[in-house]
Image (spheres, helix red, strand yellow):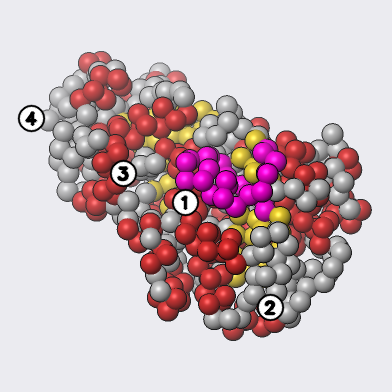
Amino acid sequence: MSFSNLGLSDKVLAAVAATGYTTPTPIQEQAIPHVLARRDVLGIAQTGTGKTAAFVLPMLTLLEKGRARARMPRTLILEPTRELAAQVKENFDKYGAGQKLNVALLIGGVSFGDQDSKLTRGVDVLIATPGRLLDHTERGGLLLTGVELLVIDEADRMLDMGFIPDIERICKLVPFTRQTLFFTATMPPEIRRITEAFLHNPQKVEVSRPASTAVTVSQLQVGCGREAHEKRDILRQLIRGAKDLKNAIIFCNRKREVALLHKSLLKHGFSAVALHGDMEQPARMAALDQFRKGESALLVASDVAARGLDIPEVSHVFNFDVPHHPDDYVHRVGRTGRAGRLGTAISIVSPADQKSVVAIEKLIGQPIPAMEGAPVADVTNLDISERPSRSSSRRGGDKRRGDRAPKERQTAERPSQERQPQERQPQERHTQERHPEKSGEERKPRRNEQRGGRGRKSEIDSNSVAPIQTASSPPSIGRLRSEPAASRDAGADAGDHSHLPAFLLRPIRARV
Ligand code: AMP
């Protein structure tokens, strides 16, 4: 199948050819003809499948006819985060270079005045986050009655972020006769309900099993104690010991942890940038840019900030924290192993994370193997040879705070602000857009996460051992700066252990 069989216009085909793409991806092949035929489409596809072009290319073809009117956009694309919205705009800039279309971005962190004047000039494609879009409609500066085509992208993410009530309101503001393209990676019941309410006889297009991880990604887990400094120590060892590490995204569950870990990595001589929702928009874009260009090998990020971002060729993903929601795991792991490339995803698992790991394994339908020779969570007073298998350590559980039923934990941890954006008043929403930390574009720390660092003392005292390294020197990892020579050499007497994972060379100190 080639792009020329899909019904796209000559201009769009020329733009595709200029990017060097010769074959449509499965989602493009299946969705584009239906979009051009003006059908509603329900696309079940993860990021990395080429789904953005699956709606951008036919939209560009359809938009060649007709003109925009002031304050009445012809098409509307809803995205959960500013970065995703900006990424979609880049797609329009890339594929629509030969067309004179007005494409506007309505996202928080940008002045209303500039956005208003763009709307006044008439917009062919409006790409927006739900909150800022509703702000504009409530101010009377925007009419959605001219929208012919509506795209709801990353719908399951919108659900996670509590945007569904906003989406429902927006759907009621656009004409009933519009065409709707709806993309989601998973189909939880709430999303199914929305699709039944707002799509008309949609053509369903599914390109991969929902919530599956790519077969090209090696997934591993490494146990650790509870202390944050121990996790950081393990992460540094994983980075230094990783084979073929070109670059990596390191995920944390909390914004605060992102900032702390970023600082710590810099202190230890790594080249790293951070991405989380508390950062100002220009700083977020600059960090992403640095990582994309390879100027920084490590990106420390929170889920919301990194979800769906198109960062090709990420060799490694580290879960510094195991995500509480299994879907997040799938999305994180999906940052590597894209487009058939090989990737590695390693999760650092503390005793409290065991239940999350069980839920993840259930969702992805496969166990996440323990990294060979790596420490296993909850190990005390044991020599390495006596370590229990992963399953037996899991049975031990975390009696102090991790043993609540998963459902109960989820409810308790779900922040109310995220869940009820419909209760925000218009004025309040303006404030929130100016202060991204309140905008609902980032998860708040969950109750039991806020107690980080106060758990029982780590079993493995990282201060008692020198930083380890296998006997062979660490693989070259591009722009990662390494530790001072003294600490690098600490494991140089490891003899013939060069084949062993670094963890096996690390003394375990029994607690007395
Ligand atoms: P997306 O799923 O939209 O985030 O796209 C993932 C990546 O695939 C992006 O870097 C696109 O530029 C790239 N891409 C999209 N369509 C194609 C194609 N037909 N062939 C090769 N790469 C593509």
Classed neighbour count for the residue bearing mark 1: other residues with Cα under 10 Å, few (<14), some (14–19), many (≥20): some
* Mark closer to the observer (4, 2): 2
Instruction: Tell which circle, 3 or 4, labels the residue nearer the N-terminal end.
Output: 3
In-front residue for pair 161/442: 161
Residue at 26%, 25% (x, y): give it: 394
Between the residue at mark 3 and the residue at mark 4, the CA separation in whole angstroms equals 36 Å
> Is residue 183 found inside the magenta-colored segment of the image?
yes
Instruction: Tell which circle, 1 or 3, labels the residue nearer the N-terminal end.
Output: 1
Q: Which residue is mark 1?
A: 159
Query: Residue 71 got which mark?
Result: 2
Q: Which residue is mark 3?
A: 410
Classed neighbour count for the residue bearing mark 4: other residues with Cα under 10 Å, few (<14), some (14–19), many (≥20): few
Give the extent of the magenta segment.
Answer: 180-205
Say which amino acid is labelled 3.
Answer: Gln
* Mark closer to the observer (1, 4): 1
Between the residue at mark 1 and the residue at mark 3, the CA separation in whole angstroms equals 15 Å
Residue at 53%, 43% (x, y): give it: 192
Residue positioned most to the left: 512
Instruction: Tell which circle, 3 or 2, labels the residue nearer the N-terminal end.
Output: 2
Say which amino acid is labelled 4.
Answer: Val
Asked if the residue at tag 2 contacts the one at tag 3, i.e. Cβ–Cβ closer than 8 Å, the answer is no
What element does badge 4 sit on? loop
What element does badge 1 sit on? helix
Between the residue at mark 2 and the residue at mark 1, the CA separation in whole angstroms equals 28 Å
Instruction: Tell which circle, 2 or 1, labels the residue nearer the N-terminal end.
Output: 2
* Mark closer to the observer (3, 2): 2
Residue positioned most to the top: 385
Instruction: Tell which circle, 1 or 4, labels the residue nearer the N-terminal end.
Output: 1
Query: Residue 512 got which mark?
Result: 4
Between the residue at mark 1 and the residue at mark 4, the CA separation in whole angstroms equals 48 Å
